[in-house]
Image (tube, helix red, strand yellow):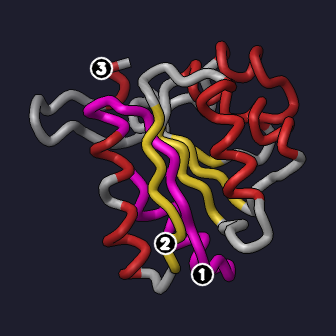
Amino acid sequence: YLAQAMEALAKAGAKSAASVFESASFTKGVCAALPELADKFDLTLQAEIEVVSSPTSVDLDPVARNLSMVENDPDIVVACVYDQGCAEWVGSLRKSGWSPRAQVFTVCVGMDKFTDAVGTDAMYMMGVSPWDPSLDMRDQVVGWSAMEFS
């Protein structure tokens, strides 16, 4: 999920990254790739922060404040969270007055519910959408195309 995004951002000049991930199998699994990718693309991994499942601003506001501090301030933040966590994370970033130079999300970007929740804050965000019906790809396990799955 993250390899292409991290490679592109490193080529664009990013030097550091951090992750915020929900305590859930999928989200942990996706963000677990970040240390290896950071090493591969010569990025300093500044933090890997686990938050509760379905985090709210109570959980995410302190994380945003901490990452926004001058001594932290990663170029890239990878947010491995589900749709509620995505909207809450964007709200926490806004409250902290901080916007990472790049954000990569696992699930929510492109989902109507997310866009409705955060409005124009969703502009210019990068995420994965592996099952968009327009993609010319097949699942390696069941053999379904993106069109068949969607």
Q: Amino acid at mark 1?
A: Lys
Residue under the point 75% across and 17% down: 117
Q: Which residues are magenta?
A: 1-27
Task: Say if residue 134 shows up in the picture.
Answer: no
Q: Position of residue 14 (x, y in %)?
A: 65, 77
Instruction: Determine which of the numbered discs, if any, sits on residue 45 in the image.
Output: 2
Q: Amino acid at mark 3?
A: Glu
The kind of secondary structure element at disc 2 is strand
Compared across the picture, whether 101 is left or right of 86 comes to right
Q: Mark 1 or 2, which is nearer the eye?
A: 2
Write down the residue under mark 1.
11
Q: Position of residue 41 (x, y in %)?
A: 45, 81
Q: Position of residue 134 (x, y in %)?
A: 48, 33
Compared across the picture, whether 72 is left or right of 59 comes to right
- What's the distance in space between the residues labelled 3 and 1, CA to CA? 34 Å
Among numbered discs 2 and 3, the one appearing first in the sequence: 2
Crowding around mark 2 (Cα neighbors within 10 Å: few <14, some 14 to 19, many 20+) is some
